[in-house]
Image: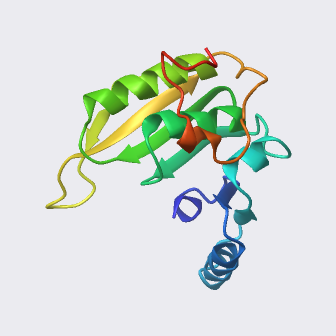
Amino acid sequence: MLAAALPEAEVDLIESTARKCEVIARLATAAGIDNATAVPARAEEWAMSEGASRYEAVTARALSSLAVLAEYAAPLMEIDGTLIAWKGARDPEEEQAGAAAAGLLGLTAHLPIPVRPFKGSRERNLYIYTKTAPTPARFPRRPGMATKRPLSHGSPLN
């Protein structure tokens, strides 16, 4: 857990399922990790309230496509903030869609970084985006829209 590795940081763990948040809180307490808070909210809802432009860094692992991750993260990030998305094998179409969405959201995409977190692991990559401009006021969209209608070059929201 990131909170254990960075005890001086405040880490919010955004999880839409309240039951999972309760488990996360119990596990953090049992492990003596007091700098992690489980937030029972969808990312879009949290970004419309207390989470708006709050974070220096946002991380995600095995959550969704890069375009959707960018849309979830951008409204949560402060200017110069960083999104770090942990993904598997590279997919040029997904990378292109992620970069296009990032551009609409005030993010700049960087080249993926191949990583090998443990012996025998294959095709793992970190995707890094930096928030270089304010996210347009129309974001976040209402919950579920990012996955139903992902942003792209042809999006009517452009």
Q: Residue at x 43, y 41 (%)?
A: 65
The percent coordinates of residue 129 (x first, y second) are 50, 28
Query: Measuring 23% from the left and 44% from the top, which residue is drawn there?
Result: 89
In the image, 19: left or right of 151?
Answer: right
Nearer to us in this view, 57 or 103? 103
Q: Residue at x 27, y 28 (%)?
A: 92
Query: For residue 141, what is the image quadrant?
Result: top right
Image position, residue 48 (x, y; %) = 82, 41
- What is the quadrant of residue 106 in the picture? top right
Residue 13 is left or right of residue 107, and the answer is right
In the displayed structure image, the side of residue 92 where residue 29 appears, left or right: right
Spot occupied by residue 107 in the image (x, y as percentages of width and height): 57, 22
| In the image, residue 153 above or below residue 73 | above
Q: Which residue is drawn at 63% across and 85% down?
A: 30
- Along the line of sight, the residue nearer the viewer: 54 or 19: 19
Vertical relation: 122 (above or below) 78: below
Q: How many labels does the image show?
A: 0
Q: Residue furthest right?
A: 49
Q: Is residue 108 visible?
A: no
Q: Is residue 4 above or below residue 135?
A: below
**Is residue 93 visible in this depiction of the protein?**
yes
Q: Which of 95 and 22 is in front in this view?
A: 95
Colour convention: rainbow
- The answer to which quarter of the image holds residue 109 is top left
Q: From the image, which quarter does the C terminus lie in?
A: top right
